Amino acid sequence: MLDSNVASHKALADGGGYRFMFYGDLSGAHVCTTKEIYYGDTQEEALQAAWQAEGRKHFNQCRKCGKWVSLAMYNVDVLECVECAPFEAEAKFCKNCGAKIEEPTKPCPTCGKPLAYYGKGWSK
Ligand SMILES: [Zn+2]
Ligand SMILES: [Zn+2]
């Protein structure tokens, strides 16, 4: 189940409290483990404290789907995860004029149209 205000995580009981391992919601990759041990009346309380103090800063939240992802899985141009706003694969053919692309360049060498999404700052 996706917990919308905290990234995927695993609790490790430690010294009467918990350490937490946080994972990217999309990749499932381990992003960080808290250095401190967190205590709370419930595991959820300890989790929230750990998230605010250590976990949160390693993640970005997709404004579209709400998933927490590491920077590598985050398209900063649109503030969405790469699932919602993928970095496009390098173009093999121009989707505007159909020219074959030998070396991926920003604009198509034949017609000058962009071959991929380059963020809102890029225009031609
Ligand atoms: Zn998303
Ligand atoms: Zn073209």
Image: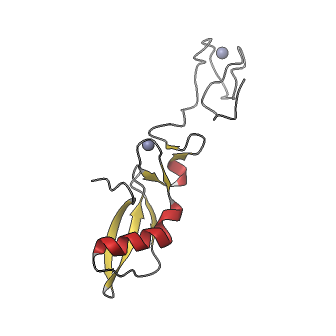
Quadrant hosting residue 105: top right
Residue 92 spot, x, y in % from top left: 58, 23
Q: Residue furthest top?
A: 97
Residue at x 50%, y 36% (from the top left corner): 86
Residues 92 and 49: in front is 49
Residues 93 and 83: in front is 83
Residue at x 39%, y 58% (from the top left corner): 5
Compared to residue 100, the image places residue 10 above or below, namely below
Residue 15 spot, x, y in % from top left: 33, 88
Residue at x 52%, y 62% (from the top left corner): 58
Residue at x 33%, y 80% (from the top left corner): 40
Q: Residue furthest bottom?
A: 15
Residues 90 and 107: in front is 107
What colour scheme does the image use? Answer: secondary structure
Residue 65 spot, x, y in % from top left: 40, 43
Residue 41 spot, x, y in % from top left: 28, 80
Quarter holding the C terminus is: top right
Compared to residue 105, the image places residue 27 above or below, namely below
Compared to residue 29, the image places residue 94 above or below, namely above
Compared to residue 37, the image places residue 65 above or below, namely above
Quadrant hosting residue 45: bottom left
- Ligand 2: which quarter? top right
Q: From the viewer's perspective, is 96 left or right of 45?
A: right
Q: How many marks?
A: 0
Q: From the viewer's perspective, is 52 left or right of 47?
A: right
